[in-house]
Image: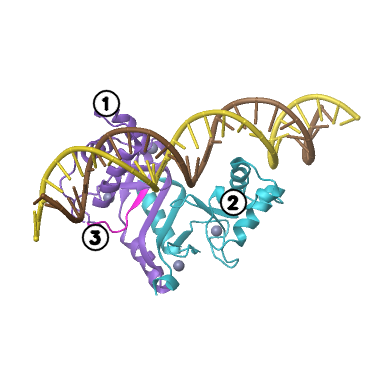
Chain colours: A purple, B cyan, C yellow, D brown
Amino acid sequence: MIAPALTKNQSLVFEVLNRSDAPMSAYTILDRLRDHGFRAPLQVYRALDKLLEFGLVHRLESLNAFVACSHAQSDCCSRGHGTVAFAICESCGHVSEFHDHAVDHRLGDWAKEKGFKPAKTTIEIRGLCSACAA
Amino acid sequence: MIAPALTKNQSLVFEVLNRSDAPMSAYTILDRLRDHGFRAPLQVYRALDKLLEFGLVHRLESLNAFVACSHAQSDCCSRGHGTVAFAICESCGHVSEFHDHAVDHRLGDWAKEKGFKPAKTTIEIRGLCSACAA
DNA sequence: ATCAATTGCGTTATGCTATAACGTGTGTCA
DNA sequence: TGACACACGTTATAGCATAACGCAATTGAT
Ligand SMILES: [Zn+2]
Ligand SMILES: [Zn+2]
Ligand SMILES: [Zn+2]
Ligand SMILES: [Zn+2]
C-alpha cells in the first residue's frame, strides 16, 4: 500500500494528529478542524480511513482513538507494518509505539499451529509511563 | 478478586454470554434479556462491570463486545488472570482465548526496560479460524 | 434494635462513536 | 464524449456507554 499525495482533508487530519502528543478521538479532531471548514464526522472518518490504509495513522482499539504512526525510519521488519504494539499511559496520555520480533513470531507460531489466518493484530498495554509512575 | 455469589442480573448476563458461541454487544445482551425484565442498557453494563471484575467475562476491545471467560481450569499462570490473548474469527465469530508465556514475559520485559508500569494488556488477533480459512 | 454505610437496582436522559444514503464536482482514460 | 473512479459535503441514523436521580435490601457496627 504505497501512499499517493494526500488530499487536503487527509493532510489536515494527519497534521492535527502529528502535532498531538496524545491520541485523539475522531470528534476531537473534528473540533480542531472546524476553522478549516470541517462540519461533519464523515469528513474526519473518511480521511482517517485512508490514513490508516496508508499506514500513516494507527487506531487504538482500547481508546476508540487515533495516533500518527511513530515508527523510527530505521525499524526493521515493521516497515510496511508488521505487527506493532502500543504502551499507553493512562495518566499523561503518551503513547509509545514499538515492534517486537519475539512477540510477533510467537503469536504467528500460535496461529500456524491452530490453522488460524491472522489479518490484523492489536496489542495495547495500558498503564503508567516511566515519568508518571515515578 | 474472589467472586461472591452472583446477583440475579449478573447471573442472567453471565448465562447469556456463556451460552453464546460468539461475542455479544451489551445491547444484544439487553435484547436477549427483555423477557427477564431488562429494560435499560445500564442493567447490562452494571452486571458486566462486576463480571469483568470477577474475571468471569472479558471485553474484546476491537469489537466493543464481551465473551465469557473460557480458560481451561488447568491453565498455568493465567489463573487469577495473567495476560490473555484472543483469536477472533471475522467470518464465524468464534473466539479462542489463550495464554502464552513467551508473549507475556516479552511484553513484561519491554515494560521493565522502559520503566512502564502495565495495568492491563489487550492482545486480539482478527482473522479467519481454521474452519473458515479452509 | 437502630442507625449508617454499602451495594444493587430501575429509570430517564444524555453523550460519544461510527456509518448509511444521497447528491455534487473533478479528473482520467478509452 | 461518455464511463468510471474518487474525493467531497450534507443530513440522518445507528450503535456504544455513562451521568444523575431515587429507592430497596444488606450488612455491620454501636
Ligand atoms: Zn506505525
Ligand atoms: Zn505518563
Ligand atoms: Zn479468561
Ligand atoms: Zn471461523
Looking at the rendered image, the quarter that the C terminus of chain B falls into is bottom left
Magenta region includes residue A78: no
**Mark number, residue A35:** 1
Answer above or below: position of C4 versus B40.
above
Respond whether the residues carrying marks 2 and 3 are from the same subunit: no
Residue D4, given in percent of the width and then of the height, sits at: 20, 55
Residue at x 60%, y 57% (from the top left corner): B17
Residue beneath the point at 35% across and 47% down: A59
> Which secondary structure class fits the magenta region best?
loop
The region drawn magenta spans A80-86
Q: Residue at x 59, y 51 (%)?
A: B29
The subunit letter for the residue under badge 3 reads A
Numbered label attached to residue B29: 2
Q: Which mark is on residue A132?
A: none
What x and y, as percent, mark residue A112? Answer: 38, 72
Element type where label 2 sits in the image: helix
The residue beneath circle 3 is A77
- Give the mark, 1 or 3, whose residue is nearer the N terminus: 1
Name which quarter of the figure residue B20 lies in.
Answer: bottom right
Report how far apart the C-alphas of labels 1 and 2 lie in the structure: 41 Å
Residue type at mark 1?
Asp
